[in-house]
Amino acid sequence: MSLVPHSQLRLVRIRKALEGALAAQEWDRLRQLDVDLMAALDQASDDPNRHPETLLSELAVIVDLYKDLVLSNELHRQTGGI
């Protein structure tokens, strides 16, 4: 049984926090989590113990999340939120 590296677990935790911040429309928190997620992504990508299939699967989830984030941000701007 192989274990998922800590760097990839960190990536998942930050992505889930980003999902929560998006659902709550916490825009300042989203900005910080975006930075954190990019750093975690770099770390997970550079991890010599990474699981490529697991990492690619998580990247697909992240891409979908960013699609939702962009759409939500555009809607927020259109309704005068920003």
Image (spheres, rainbow, N blue to C red):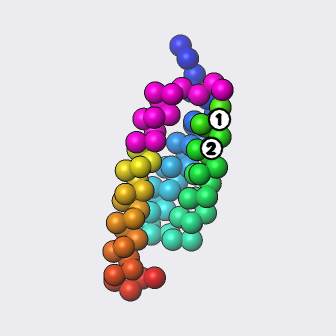
Name which residue lies at 65% across and 31% down.
47
Determine if the magenta segment contains residue 53. yes
Q: Is residue 8 visible?
A: yes
Determine if the magenta segment contains residue 54. yes
Q: Is residue 23 visible?
A: no
Residue position marked by numbered label 2 in the rendering: 42
Q: Residue 49 is drawn in which quadrant?
A: top right
Residue position marked by numbered label 1 in the rendering: 46
Query: Percent from the top left, x then y, of residue 53?
Result: 46, 27
Q: Residue 80 versus residue 53: which sits nearer the camera?
A: 53
The residue furthest top is: 1
Query: Percent from the top left, x then y, of residue 19?
Result: 45, 55
The amino acid marked with disc number 1 is Asp
Range covered by the magenta-colored residues: 48-60
The amino acid marked with disc number 2 is Asp
Q: Are marks 1 and 2 in contact (CB under 8 Å)?
A: yes
Mark 2, secondary structure of its residue: helix
Mark 1 Cα shell of 10 Å, populated few (<14), some (14-19), many (≥20): few
